[in-house]
Image (cartoon, rainbow, N blue to C red):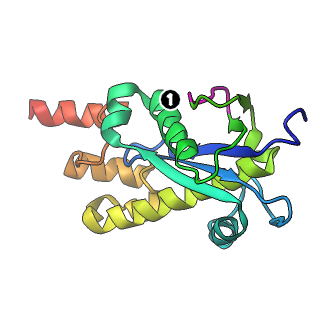
Amino acid sequence: MMYAHLICCGVDEAGRGPLAGPVSAAAVILNPARAIAGLADSKKLSEKKRDLLAPQIREHALAWAVAYASVEEIDELNILQASLLAMRRAVLALPVTPEYVLVDGLFCPDTGIQSEAIVQGDSKVAAISAASILAKTARDALMLALHEQYPQYGFAGHKGYGTAAHLAALQEHGACAIHRRSFKPVRDVLLTQATR
């Protein structure tokens, strides 16, 4: 652990797979003096458990930030580059500048800070686990708010993922402003709409 003595932040994203909504990312610098019990990969935690941990992370961490890349940026750049952009924004938004950045996955965002990508980092590094929880809960809350705007799609339930219910709603109502036009199921619906 060459970075153990450095101020490290963990970084992760949420929402690469959905057909709608932005991709979110969080960066977290944990406080070694204030350990948070139960940190794990957000995908392995129940929604209830994530919702309990998120406020603890925000309260006990030395620093944290959440950032997004928009649907337009996803469509323009591609989902990987948009995810890296959201991660970069999260790291640069931290009120404390980290000395080392630990990123979940295969790629590091360009932050100008020494970084390391860790495959399955969200289940290996506590700060990345914390970031995965903040990114996921922030995005879920945003999709709940967007459900109020576009209730016909059922975003409150599937959070934009390509469930059978979501695909059926897409077929019935067409795509809305927050659908990712570069994603095949949305593109197919738009093509169908255009030829009607």
Residue occupying image coordinates x 41% and y 60%: 143
| Relative side of 193 to 67, left or right | left
Q: Do we see residue 16 in this rendering?
A: no
Q: Quadrant of residue 184?
A: top left
Q: Can you give x and y, in whole percent of width and height, for residue 157 in the image? A: 45, 63
Looking at the image, which residue sits at the far right? Answer: 1
- The residue labelled by disc 1 is 80
Is the magenta region chiefly helix, strand or loop? Answer: loop
Q: What stretch of residues is rendered in magenta?
A: 105-110
Say if the magenta span includes residue 108: yes
Foreground residue, 115 or 175? 115
Q: Quadrant of residue 175?
A: top left
Q: Do we see residue 83 in this rendering?
A: yes
Q: Residues within 10 Å of mark 1 (few under 14, many from 20)?
A: few
Foreground residue, 63 or 10? 63
Q: Can you give x and y, in whole percent of width and height, for residue 168 in the image? A: 32, 50
Three-letter amino acid code of the residue under disc 1: Leu
Looking at the image, which residue sits at the far left? Answer: 196
Residue occupying image coordinates x 64% and y 66%: 58
Q: Can you give x and y, in whole percent of width and height, for residue 77 in the image? A: 38, 26
What is the quadrant of the N terminus in the image?
top right
Q: Report how many numbered discs are placed on residues in the image.
A: 1
Say if the magenta span includes residue 66: no
Residue occupying image coordinates x 41% and y 66%: 144
